[in-house]
Amino acid sequence: MYEVDDNNTDLGKVEISPEVIEVIAGMAANEVDGVAAMHGSFATGVAERIGRKNYGKGIKVDLTEEGITIDVQLHMKFGVSIPDVGRCVQDNIAQTLRTMTALEVNAINIHVVGIEFEQESNTSIENG
C-alpha cells in the first residue's frame, strides 16, 4: 500500500494499493495512439477469454523507499515511431496518476515486446 501524504485533514489516511496504480497506468497507456495492446501472461489471456477484463495487464508497479517505478510491457502498431509513442505513453501515465492520485512517479519504463500488423480484410479478388 502507498500512503498519500495530505496534511490538510485529520479525518484519517488514504492508502492506494499497487493494483489500483496498475489499472490507472494500464488504462492511460491504452489511450495513446500507436499502442496496439498491453502484454499479458497466459493466465490473463485465459481470464479475458472467459469474459474477465484485466485492466492492469502488462503493468508492474514497484513501491520502494526511493519511490514508485512502473514497468509497462506493450505491443505497438506497425509503422509508428516507437520512441515517440513510448514518450507519449510515459507522459500520459504520469499525468493521469498525478491527476487521479496526486502521486509522482520516479520512473516509467516502456518495454516494447511486440508489433501488431493491421488485419487485412477477408475480401478476395477474383481474376477474370
Image (spheres, rainbow, N blue to C red):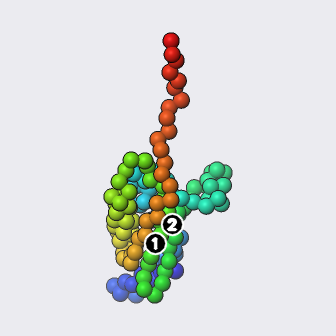
From the viewer's perspective, tell me whether residue 33 is left or right of residue 16: left
Give the x, y percent position of residue 13: 45, 84
Nearest the camera: 54 or 108?
108
Q: Residues within 10 Å of mark 2 (few under 14, many from 20)?
A: many
| Amino acid type shown at disc 2 | Ile
Q: Residues within 10 Å of mark 1 (few under 14, many from 20)?
A: many
Going from N to C along the chain, the mark reached first, 2 or 1, is 2
Relative to residue 64, is residue 34 depicted above or below? above
| Amino acid type shown at disc 1 | Ile
Say which residue label 2 marks.
Answer: 59
Relative to residue 71, is residue 114 depicted above or below? above
Q: Is residue 96 visible?
A: no
Say which residue label 1 marks.
Answer: 70
Q: Secondary structure at mark 1?
A: strand
Q: Secondary structure at mark 2?
A: strand
From the viewer's perspective, tell me whether residue 1 is left or right of residue 51: left
At 53% from the left and 29% from the top, the residue drawn is 122
Give the x, y percent position of residue 27: 45, 59
At 64% from the left and 50% from the top, the residue drawn is 49
Q: Is residue 34 visible?
A: yes
Q: CA distance from mark 2 to mark 1?
A: 7 Å
Nearest the camera: 30 or 9?
30
Circle on res. 124: none
Give the x, y percent position of residue 11: 43, 84
At 54% from the left and 61% from the top, the residue drawn is 57
Label 2 with label 1: CB-CB less than 8 Å:
yes
Corner quadrant of residue 106: bottom left
Give the x, y percent position of residue 72: 47, 65
